[in-house]
Image (cartoon, grey):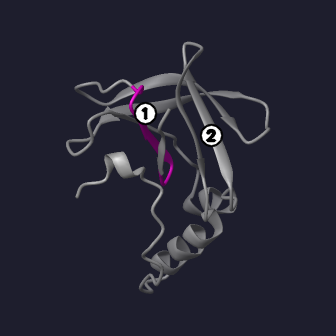
Amino acid sequence: MYGEVRNNALAAEAIPSPTTVETITVTLTQNDEPPATVKAFNYAMPNLPFGVIAFAVPTIDAALAGMEDVQSFDVKINGQSVANTTWHSGLTVRDEFRKCLNGQPYSVTDIDIVPDRLQTP
């Protein structure tokens, strides 16, 4: 199953793609932590052929503090896994986000976790 992490959101082929933004209940498991059932936003993006689930974070600092270099995610809706993925280079991405937040240009441009089959030629 493909999943792509975008900030605090996951996009995947099995995620519903509603016509309007909806608040849904999902179960999120990160790494080996116990699952957490939370509310999340479910929406469609015009440039993606599948849905997105976005998680609210209390602050950008909290989001950045929770980033690990390698991190796995499994998101379930009604007990069914809709996004199961792992990211890499999380600490590099975190550092680039911090630069951006401080008004500095980013310097890393080659982190790409999108599978080849979904990249445009």
**Dot 2 amino acid type:** Phe
Residue 11 x %, y %: 41, 40
- Element assignment for label 2: strand
The residue that mark 1 highlights is: 41
Give the numbered dot on residue 14: none
Q: Which residue is drawn at 44% across and 81% down?
A: 106
Q: Is residue 44 left or right of residue 104?
A: left
CB contact under 8 Å: marks 1 and 2? no
Residue 80 vertical placement versus 35 (above, below): above
Q: What element carries label 1?
A: strand
Mark linked to residue 73:
2
Q: Is residue 29 left or right of residue 33?
A: left
Is residue 63 covered in magenta? no
Q: Position of residue 45 (x, y in %)?
A: 26, 41
Quarter of the image for residue 16 reads top left
Start and end of the magenta stretch?
6-15
How far apart in space, not on screen, are marks 1 and 2 (Cα)? 16 Å
Residue at 31% x, 31% y is 21
